[in-house]
Image: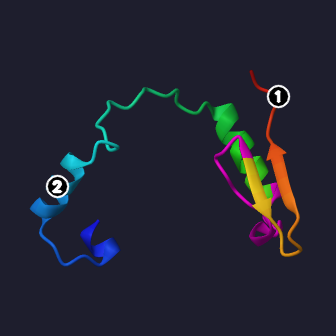
Amino acid sequence: MRAQLGLNVSKMTIWRSVQRNTKITREIMRKALRLTPQHKEAHLLFARSNMTTQWDKVIFSDEKSSTWMDPMGIVIIGIIGGGT
């Protein structure tokens, strides 16, 4: 972390800052199912069929809904999935 942020502080200073921050909590990771051979095959099929896709034109987000502003000043709101 220190090298990534270019900080000139000790490890202990970073550790104390992390401990003081109430928004950073330690949690045990939840177990996740392993990928089945069918999932792996589907991943490979997707990757192969999208090798020529212009990914620099795609916006990736982990948010359910997003608000974007395009160069013309138009606001676009998109909601992904129906969900409950």
At 75% across and 71% down in the image, what residue appears?
A: 56
Q: Give whichever of 31, 59 is nearer the camera.
A: 59
CB of mark 2 within 8 Å of CB of mark 1?
Answer: no
Segment tinted magenta in the rendering:
49-65
* Location of residue 41 with respect to 36 vertically, above or below: below
Q: Return the x and y of residue 17 as percentages of the image width and height.
A: 20, 56
- Identify the mark nearer the N-term, 2 or 1: 2
Q: Amino acid at mark 2?
A: Trp
Q: To which residue does mark 1 refer?
A: 82
Residue 15: which disc? 2
Q: Return the x and y of residue 58 as percentages of the image width and height.
A: 78, 63
Q: Return the x and y of residue 7 as percentages of the image width and height.
A: 25, 76
At 29% across and 65% down in the image, what residue appears?
A: 1
Q: Secondary structure at mark 1?
A: loop
Question: Which of the 4 image quadrants contains residue 57?
Answer: bottom right
32 relative position to 6: left or right: right
* Location of residue 84 with respect to 74 vertically, above or below: above
2 relative position to 58: left or right: left
Viewport quadrant of the C terminus = top right
Question: Which of the 4 image quadrants contains residue 2?
Answer: bottom left
The secondary structure that most of the magenta stretch takes on is loop
Real-space CA distance between mark 2 and mark 1, rounded to the nearest whole angstrom: 42 Å
Q: Is residue 59 magenta?
A: yes
Q: Return the x and y of residue 22 as percentages of the image width and height.
A: 29, 42
Using a 10 Å C-alpha cutoff, classify the residue at mark 2 as few (fewer than 14 neighbours), some (14 to 19) or many (20 or more): few
Q: Amino acid at mark 1?
A: Gly
Using a 10 Å C-alpha cutoff, classify the residue at mark 1 as few (fewer than 14 neighbours), some (14 to 19) or many (20 or more): few
48 relative position to 6: left or right: right
Residue 67: which disc? none
Q: Is residue 56 magenta?
A: yes
50 relative position to 19: left or right: right
Q: Secondary structure at mark 2?
A: helix
